[in-house]
Amino acid sequence: MMSSTPTTNILITDATLNIAECSQWVMTPESGGIDVFIGTVRNATKGKAVLRLEFEAYATMAIKEMEKIAAEVYTKWPLQKVLIHHRTGTLQVGEIPVIIAVSAAHRDAAFEAGRYIIDTLKQTVPIWKKEIFEDGEVWVAAHP
């Protein structure tokens, strides 16, 4: 599921996320700073080996919440473009569940907006992950 304008690109998909395409999308001639956050599946949580993660989303609501976050960062920082992509389905260690990319004339705005987006996404967007371990599994927030 996707939502896109000339300055905002939001996606929830079960397909592999492409770092280069996301970075390229936010580039503009006016951008002096581009911040890209790439969330990856790590191999351990709280000392336990992670075999894989499974992500689920209430896609319609998640897209709306991501649109709200994007609209909000445009009011807080002078940005050119905002991209928020999140993956669903089963992901192995090293795969990418989330990419946040932001462009701005100056680096401070890009850094601050990128951090705000990922932190707010963790709190408000209905995306859940299940961590699968050798000895069991547990549902947790999308980004602990």
Image: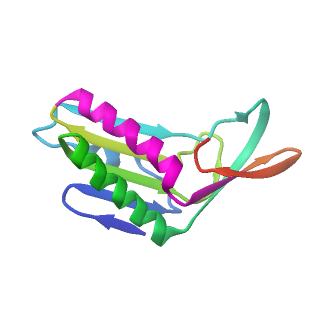
- State left or right for residue 141 relative to residue 22: right
User: With 90 as the anchor, is 48 left or right in this view?
Assistant: right
Image location (x, y in percent) of residue 114: 36, 38
Point out the stretch of residues depicted in magenta: 106-130
Residue 78 position within the rendered picture, expressed as x and y whole percent measured from the top left: 17, 40
Residue lying at the far bottom in this picture: please name it: 60
Q: Residue furthest right?
A: 135
Which residue sits furthest left?
Answer: 30
Tell me if 68 is positioned left or right of 125 in this view. Answer: left
In the rendered image, which quarter contains the C terminus? top right
* Quarter of the figure with residue 102: top left
Residue at image position (27%, 35%) is 110
The answer to whether residue 111 is magenta is yes
Relative vertical location of residue 34 with respect to residue 84 in this rendering, above or below: above
Comparing 91 with 69, the one in front is 69
79 vs 10, left or right, is left
